[in-house]
Image (spheres, grey):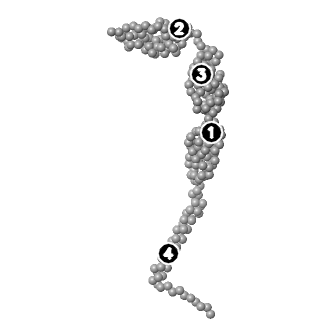
Amino acid sequence: MKKSYTISIPVKTFWKVVIPGLVIICAIGAVGGFLVVDRFIMPNVVGVNRDIVEVPSVKGLQYESAREKFFEVGLLTEIRSREYDDTVPQNGIINQFPETGAKVKKGRKIAVTISKGKEITVVPEVRKLTENQARIELRKKGLTIGKITKVYADKTPEDHVVNIVPQSGTTISRQIEVELFVSKGPKPTHAEVPNLVGESIGTAKKMISESGLRLGKVNYQNNSALLPGTVISQSVTPGSRVKLESSVNLVVSVIRN
């Protein structure tokens, strides 16, 4: 014969202890279930994580190729800096941030450091190229063009490079500026005399030099109607053609008491 057992709980204890305990247990279970659904189930159902992508590796790629690779996964590219690097070719990617494998939102800019190539290079041969062609060749080597000097050259056509400093074939740092000497064509035998009357003596000297002429004697004449140092007259008629390096004499105003 089976025995039956009963548990007797006082009514007051039942309502004050058991019922509140059950309510608390149910509430904890409901919150836990909500968190599981919210964090693990719903993102896969509604696609919340679809805007998160993994950053691909672009180290060593050329800049344009790196941009395309980022764009394919919905990322943008930002140049952080340019540095010399002995192992990564010019315009290649040295490093990136965020790093490869990082999880980021689509549309994020990935900062990259671009190589300027090796710090040292060999100066290319650019003599007899046009100035523009020489600029292109020097930029290919990552070199910066400094001063450009125009010179007369009988055997080099106008606008072509006569010489380069440092010389072609020299190994230099890319931080050193390269100076070009560009032909003005054959040296002329004659020059046209500029109109110097009314100019200041300083301006007149510059105009004479630029015309391939020489300043001759300078005489001074009292003239209160003109500012001191103004050219009153010149020994050679303006517009006339004379031999190169001919002298031009000037009369310049002064004010004497």
Q: Is residue 219 above or below residue 137?
A: above
Q: Crowdedness of circle 3 by 10 Å Cα count: few (<14), some, many (20+)?
A: many
Q: Residues within 10 Å of mark 4 (few under 14, many from 20)?
A: few
Residue annotated with mark 4:
23
Name the image quarter holding the C terminus. Answer: top left
In the image, is residue 98 above or below residue 195? below
Disc 2 crowd rating (10 Å Cα; few below 14, some 14-19, many 20+) is: some
Q: CA distance from mark 4 to mark 3?
A: 93 Å
Residue position marked by numbered label 2 in the rendering: 246
What's under tag 2, amino acid-wise?
Ser
Ranked by sequence position, the earlier of labels 1 and 2 is 1
Q: Quadrant of residue 94?
A: top right
User: Which mark's residue is nearer the viewer, 3 or 1?
Assistant: 1
The quarter of the picture where the N terminus appears is bottom right
Q: Of the residues shown, which amino acid type is indicated by label 1?
A: Asp
Kind of element beneath mark 1: loop
Distance between the Cα atoms at labels 2 and 4?
A: 114 Å
Mark 4 vs mark 3: give the one in front.
3
Residue lying farthest to the bottom in this orientation: 1
Quarter of image, res 46: bottom right
The amino acid sitting under disc 4 is Val
Q: Is residue 21 above or below residue 115?
A: below
The residues bearing labels 3 and 1 have C-alpha atoms spaced at a distance of: 31 Å
- Mark nearest the camera among 4 and 1 is 1
